[in-house]
Amino acid sequence: MASVSVRAGGGGGRGLLARPTATDGFWSWFTTVDHKKIGILYGITSFAFFIVGGSEALLIRLQLARPDQNILKPSVYNEIFTMHGITMVFLVVMPLSAAFINYLVPLMIGARDVAFPRLNAFSYWVFLAGGLFIYSSWFLGGAPNGGWFGYAPNSVVDPSRGMTFYAIGLIITGIASTVSAVNLAVTILNLRAPGMTLFRMPVFVWMSLVVQLLLAFSLPIITVGLVELLFDRRFGTHFFDPAAGGDPVLWQHLFWLFGHPEVYILVLPAMGIVSEILPVFSRKPLFGYQFVVFSGIAIGFIGFGVWAHHMFAVGLGPVANTAFGISTMIIGVPTGVKIFNWLGTMWKGDIRFTTPMLFAVGFVAMFVIGGLSGVTHAVVPSDYQQTDTYYIVAHFHYVLFGGAIFGLFGGMYYWWPKVFGRMLNEKVGKLHFWMMLIGFNLTFGPMHILGLQGMPRRIQSYPASLGLDFWNLVSSIGAFTIALSVLIFIVNAVSSFRKPKGMEADPWDARTLEWSTSSPPPEYNFEEVPVVYSLDELWRRKYAETEGGRVVPVVAGGSGTQEHLTESAGHGGGHGIHLPGPSYFPVLASIGFPVLGYGIIFSWPLAVAGVVVLLAGLYGWALEPSAE
Amino acid sequence: MRKKTRLLLGAGALLLVAAACAPNATQSSLDPQGPYARKSYDLFIPVFWVAVTIFVLVEGALLLIAIKYRHRKGRDKIPPQIHGNTRLEIAWTILPALILAGVAVPTVTTIFDLARKPAGEVMNVHVLGHQWWWEFDYPGQQIITANEMHIPTGIPIYVTLCSVGSGYQQGIGAPSDCQPGPPDGQPPAAVGNAVIHSFWVPELAGTQDVVPGRANTLLLQADHPGTYTGQCKEFCGLSHAYMKFTVVSQTPDDFAAWVRGQQADAAAPTTGSLAATGMNEFVNGACIACHAIQGVEDPNGNALVQDGGPNLTHFASRSCFAGCMMPTNEENLKKWLEDPPAVKAGSWMPDYGLTPQQIDALAAYLLTLT
């Protein structure tokens, strides 16, 4: 193969700080702008938060395992369930999806990096800063305790500092997501390899694009709400105070107008992952590619028109409830289309039940349940009973755990060899899957019954007289089963690093471009930018159809299609590959946000210091060339 | 492998048996006891079975495909690369849409049905949500009570829901516009915040949120005399879990008798009894800052004014107190008077540092208020 010269870093002395030079080793992680390293950082960070958020879930299940318990007193319980929700939504599923999107999208579209590599690093560090900022509230006057939904006026009048941390912290993570959304959307639209038309993009890339657009349009709405909440709490404004002409329902509209697209932000990446895994292990292309793509776009679009189904009991009136009930039913249609196409993909395939495939099939099976219970909420009068009960808790965990988390775990098993050059153990992986599937259904299945039998959400305890103890106990046992399965995964992950590195490029006989480069990929992704001739480009390079319609491997050196294997768009014009150099400035600038946040809560000079740090970071960044 | 499957199935069956032995839920939306709860239920059950059918079909297809097309050892033929089928796509777009349209029709009619105030006779009740207890104000009967709501069977109860807090001064027949805050411009007293609650008696009706600044309404009705429990469903702060209430439905005659009892002034304790000492403690202590008892006067000879705390005129007639966190009895009452926030997190009634003698007397007095 041709030798490739890579130019990165270089240690030039321009700008505020001397340019960092390290491209490996511990400190390189702080200055890296490589989308793959940033993807790994997102992955590790969000998994760490997953452990924390999961532990919070275990505390909740411990408290609710038996009636009339007081293991967690109400004040602590309210903090725990609030932090569980905030953590899992904003610090686990969103960034874990971001990990996959960051790592995979450039590889899948045949790019060397994202469009704005330093901005990418900035997104990660701002996200981490926001997450740590929210968690620091435990030590600085109490964690948020008004629910992840933060309904005003309760979130305004609560005397602890928690909800102020909530407002500022989510504004910070929102900045991270907005920046990243713009970056990734531009990457997908502008950096595709020659021949990679929009309809040759893998479905995962499509779903990533839809998610970035959803983020870009929905985050500003919650940001408006959060700023108003912050002003109500900190500066005595009255946006949500009816006694002064405000309206508490305004918060709910702002929150759910973001919050419902957010559900699709959480689940569409997992749908994309599943749409990659199912074809590979069925050895068939995705059934109805265009329909899967269009239904994803439709879900994203209609997702902006269903928010008030979270508010059927608020008293918006029968006309509004009818409109939102019907729009919610409509969104079930494209969701169903996806499920049928996944079944169609497996149909007549040659299905190998590897661990990623098990998780993908588990996703489909569990998501069906979440989708069906979702339809029962669209039946508004039936939702009058179910809203704010454990039936809802069951429903959205089937969507976000049975859906998103199963999909993301499937993705981890699938792309682990690509990212780390080592396989996860298949036997242990299967044990992990079955245990998680059983634990998951034990935990959340009974919650349907509990909700219908009258158990409201967010209650710290319930009396024995309600007759709810049996299913609560089952649910708690299930939660600890899930915890055990996650432990098994951790053991699997850690022990995979004991194996020697040295994975072939394409261990699964996959279909998309990321498998055409080495495992792990080099810093520059592809020695030569690939040229794309079809959907499932890698498969096309490996297999051809005979005149009789049989699919046969392309024989090396034999067939006429062989030439495509080496097709490329050249070596970067003969002067090596340009990669952006590492930089201190993204991490420096990101530190400014939490300092500013603490300043708003505690002292104005600190806030000024935060702004100074932020501006210094941005100033140095602006002066620094992208590469020396 | 077979053994494992059998073990799993066995464990599943055991679980179901255990479930059958579990006590019946007493606050269940699956056990409607009146026409309005039944409307939700009658819509849920058919939709549930439609969902079950779809569930069985889809999951069954998934299982069948997984078994039939699983990889078999020795097979190296690559399956045909099928890219899709437009007719199938159209079919599985239209079919679910038709099913959903079928579900939408009864949904919409029921939404409007439930939103309509019935033409015939109704009984109005104002339900006031406090942090964290419920107050029931009967404008037609001129009575006000807390924690335990009484209704007659057979007629619709038209409930107006208000969130109150911060010094809202209730008299009998509170205003129905639900505007929180003092009507006379006085500074609010620290007796809870007006936040969002949600009123829910699953056996009698679906939920309706109680939103500050809005007067939402809800219809409920019980077929038969009985006792039904309910509780706040929207997270409303520290003791959200302990904001419960009881609905007692009675025959119209029993209800009328209850109303007469509630309209009467509080019973005066026997002179020289412990209860009389308690009444003395009550009117000379901090109690009257928030609580009123009809027929009792303060040291200056004025009628007591209720300001933020429950009206205690017929306290002992109610089966439970403190947001129905506890049954009304001497032991619980004493525990409560000793240190309310220790019993109920965040209670707006503070620990007044009452002596055991004062507590005994107050408890004795309050328990005479039947």
Image (spheres, coloured by chain):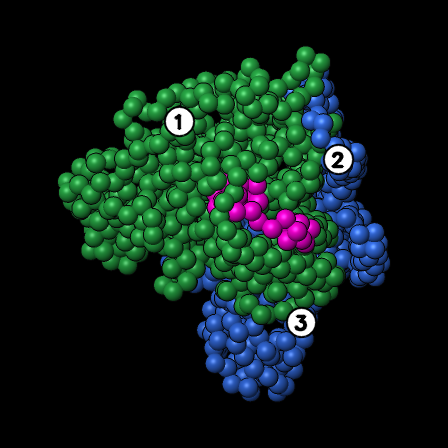
Chain colours: A green, B blue
Three-letter code for the amino acid on which mark 2 is drawn: Gly
The residue that appears at 52% across and 43% down in the rendered structure is A503
Outermost residue on the front side: it is A557
Residue range (magenta): A412-436
Q: Secondary structure at mark 1?
A: loop
- Mark 1 vs mark 3: give the one in front: 1
**Among the 4 quarters of the image, the one containing residue B363:** bottom right
Q: Report the quarter where the C terminus of chain A lies.
A: top left
Residue A12 in the image: state x and y as whole percent: 17, 41
Q: Nearer the viewer, residue A27 or B255?
A: A27
B211, A507: nearer the viewer? A507
Residue A280 among magenta residues = no
The quarter in which the N terminus of chain A is drawn is top left
Q: Is residue A105 left or right of residue A467?
A: left
| Nearest to viewer (mark 2 / mark 3) | 2
**What amino acid is at disc 1?**
Glu
Q: Give the x, y percent position of residue A177.
A: 40, 39
Identified by mark 3, the residue type is Thr
Which residue is identified by label 2?
B74
Residue to which mark 3 is pinned: B328
- Name the mark on residue A528: 1
Instruction: Report x, y in % for residue A173.
Output: 39, 45
Q: How many marks?
A: 3
- What chain is tagged by disc 3? B
Q: Nearer the viewer, residue A413 or B135?
A: A413
Residue drawn at (22%, 40%) of the image: A10
Answer above or below: position of A493 versus A194: below
* Pointers 2 and 3 within a single chain: yes
